[in-house]
C-alpha cells in the first residue's frame, strides 16, 4: 500500500496545511504516469483488470469570491451595514484536467475541492484526497483537513476547502494547485489529477487624455500674472477591477495652487464587474469608475520669469502600479491677465504707470509683431471692452540688460523712474538685483517731471 508519510505535509489528516512558497510549476504528466505504474506493480491484482474498469474522480471545483469594500466583502459588512458577502463565481475550463479562476488583490476566494468514487461496488470505499507538494499551496493560503461526507462516516465523497486572500506582491502571477484521490482499500486505483490555476490580476492604469482632460506629457503653459488655470487629470484601470486615485507629486504644485480633495463624483457604471460576469448576481457588482481631480491656480504677482513643473500621480487602491505625468508652466514678464471688471485706468494705477491710460492702450491696440505663441496678447478694438476675463495685455516692452548698465541709468533713458520699473517687475527686488542678461519690463515716458522738462525744452 502507498505510504501517506511520503506526502509529508500534504496528508489530509493534518489539521491545516499552509503553503510555504507559491511555486508556479505544473506536475509533469510523466511523473504521474510513473507513480501509477509503481502502484499497479505493487498490487497483487495488477494482472487482472484493476478497479473494475473505473477510477475515483476529483470533481470540478466550485468557488466563491469576495472583494473588500464592496457588497461582496468577506466580512459581510460594508460601512457598518450588513451585505450579502462573497458570491459564486465562474470556474472556467483551462485545458485538459485544469480549471481557472480570476482574482485581484483585496479579494478572498474559497474553493471547495471534492472527490468521489460512485461506481457500484466502490461507493463504500474510503478515499484520501491529496494535494501535490509541487506546486503546493500559495503563500498565505490555507487548505483544510479532509472532510468525510459519505453515510455513516464513510470518506466517499470527500472534501477539502482552500481559502486565500492574496496580498501586494502576489499580483500579476498565476498560481496552481493540483489534486489526486487514492482509495484506502484499493490503492492501485489512483485518480487522474486535476489542477486549479489562480490568476491574480494586477491593476492596468492609464490616463484618459482629451482636449479637457490630462494634458500631454510635458505640455507647456505660459501664464501671465492674473491668469486662471484649471488642469484636470483623469486616470482609470483599463480592466475596471481596481479603484484609482490621482494626487499631485509632493512639492511640485505652484505657490497657492489648489487641488481637488476627492475624485469628482460620477454616475456609477451599470456594467457588471469583470470578476462577477453573471447576468443576475444578487446584489449586482459593477465596474469601477475613473478618478478625475483638478488643479486650480490663479497666478499671483511676484512670480514673473519663474517656471514650475507640477507632476501628478495615479495609483490603484493597493499601490500595485503607479503612472505619472507632468506639465511645464512659465510665468512670462510684461504681460497681465485682465480680470473681470478691470479697466485700463485701473491697471495703470495697479502698476503705478501714470494717469494716462492711452499709453497702455497704444501698447495693446493691434496685433503683436513678435509674440509668445503660448501667451499672445489680445488685441482690442474698443478700450472699454477689455474686461472679458483671462484676456492678456502687454504692460510694456521688454528690455535685456547689458553688461554694466544700472537700473537708474535705464530709468533715465526710458523717461521713467526706478520705482515704476520695480513696480512692473516684482521679481526684481531692488536696483542691485539686475545683471547682464536680466529681462525687465519698461513703460517709457511715465515720469511726469521728465515729460514736463521735455515739453518746456520744446
Image (cartoon, grey):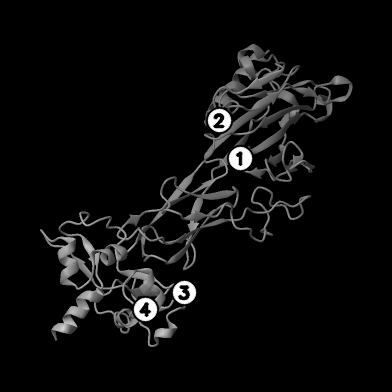
Quadrant containing the C terminus is bottom left
Q: Is residue 139 left or right of residue 156?
A: left
Circles 2 and 4: CB atoms closer than 8 Å:
no
Residue at the extreme left:
404
Q: Earlier in the sequence, mark 3 or mark 2?
A: 2
> In percent of the image, x 76 and y 51: which residue is there?
281
Mark 1 Cα shell of 10 Å, populated few (<14), some (14-19), many (≥20) = few
Q: Which residue is mark 1?
A: 96
Q: Which residue is mark 4?
A: 378
Helix, strand or loop at label 3? It is loop
User: 39 or 239: which is nearer to us?
Assistant: 239
Helix, strand or loop at label 2? It is helix
C-alpha gap between disc 1 and disc 3: 69 Å
Percent from the top left, x then y, of residue 398?
A: 23, 69
Mark 4 Cα shell of 10 Å, populated few (<14), some (14-19), many (≥20) = some
Q: Earlier in the sequence, mark 4 or mark 1?
A: 1
> Which quadrant of the view contains residue 188?
top right
User: 52 or 261: which is nearer to us?
Assistant: 261
C-alpha gap between disc 2 and disc 4: 77 Å
Q: Which residue is mark 2?
A: 29
Circles 1 and 2: CB atoms closer than 8 Å:
no
Amino acid at each position: 500500500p502507498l505510504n501517506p508519510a511520503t506526502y509529508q505535509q500534504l496528508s489530509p489528516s493534518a489539521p491545516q496545511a499552509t503553503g510555504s512558497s507559491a511555486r508556479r510549476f505544473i506536475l509533469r504528466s510523466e511523473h504521474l504516469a510513473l507513480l501509477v505504474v509503481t502502484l499497479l506493480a505493487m498490487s497483487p491484482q495488477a494482472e487482472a483488470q484493476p478497479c473494475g474498469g473505473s477510477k475515483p474522480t476529483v470533481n470540478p471545483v466550485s468557488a466563491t469570491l469576495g472583494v473588500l469594500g464592496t457588497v461582496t466583502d468577506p466580512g459581510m459588512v460594508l460601512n457598518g451595514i450588513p451585505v450579502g458577502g462573497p458570491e459564486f463565481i465562474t470556474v472556467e475550463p483551462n485545458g485538459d484536467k485544469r480549471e481557472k479562476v480570476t482574482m485581484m488583490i483585496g479579494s478572498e476566494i474559497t474553493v471547495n475541492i471534492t472527490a468521489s468514487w460512485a461506481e457500484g461496488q466502490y461507493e463504500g470505499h474510503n478515499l484520501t484526497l491529496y494535494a501535490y507538494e509541487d506546486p503546493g499551496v500559495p503563500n498565505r493560503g490555507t487548505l483544510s483537513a479532509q472532510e468525510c461526507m459519505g453515510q455513516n462516516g464513510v470518506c466517499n465523497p470527500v472534501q477539502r476547502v482552500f481559502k486565500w486572500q492574496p496580498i501586494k506582491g502576489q499580483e500579476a502571477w498565476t498560481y496552481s494547485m493540483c489534486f489526486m484521490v487514492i482509495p484506502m482499500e484499493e490503492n492501485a486505483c489512483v485518480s487522474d489529477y486535476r489542477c486549479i490555476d489562480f490568476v491574480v490580476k494586477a491593476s492596468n492604469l492609464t490616463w484618459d487624455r482629451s482636449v479637457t482632460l490630462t494634458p500631454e506629457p510635458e505640455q507647456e503653459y505660459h501664464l501671465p500674472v492674473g491668469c486662471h488655470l484649471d488642469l484636470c487629470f483623469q486616470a482609470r484601470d483599463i480592466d475596471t477591477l481596481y479603484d484609482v486615485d490621482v494626487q499631485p507629486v509632493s512639492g511640485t504644485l505652484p505657490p497657492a495652487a489648489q487641488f481637488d480633495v476627492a475624485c469628482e463624483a460620477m454616475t456609477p457604471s451599470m456594467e457588471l464587474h469583470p470578476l462577477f460576469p453573471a447576468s443576475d448576481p444578487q446584489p449586482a457588482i459593477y465596474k469601477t469608475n475613473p478618478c478625475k481631480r483638478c488643479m486650480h491656480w490663479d497666478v499671483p504677482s511676484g512670480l514673473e520669469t519663474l517656471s514650475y513643473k507640477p507632476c501628478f500621480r495615479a495609483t490603484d487602491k493597493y499601490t500595485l502600479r503607479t503612472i505619472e505625468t507632468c506639465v511645464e508652466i512659465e510665468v512670462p514678464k510684461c504681460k497681465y491677465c485682465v480680470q473681470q471688471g478691470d479697466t485700463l485706468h485701473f491697471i495703470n494705477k495697479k502698476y503705478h504707470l501714470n494717469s494716462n491710460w492711452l499709453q497702455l492702450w497704444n501698447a495693446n491696440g493691434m496685433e503683436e509683431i513678435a509674440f509668445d505663441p503660448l501667451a499672445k496678447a489680445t488685441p482690442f478694438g474698443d478700450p472699454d471692452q477689455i474686461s472679458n476675463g483671462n484676456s492678456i495685455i502687454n504692460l510694456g516692452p521688454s528690455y535685456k540688460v547689458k553688461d554694466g548698465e544700472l537700473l537708474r541709468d535705464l530709468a533715465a533713458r526710458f523717461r521713467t523712474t526706478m520705482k515704476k520699473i520695480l513696480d512692473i517687475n516684482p521679481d526684481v527686488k531692488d536696483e542691485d538685483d539686475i545683471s547682464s542678461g536680466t529681462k525687465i519690463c519698461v513703460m517709457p515716458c511715465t515720469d511726469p517731471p521728465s515729460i514736463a522738462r521735455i515739453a518746456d525744452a520744446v
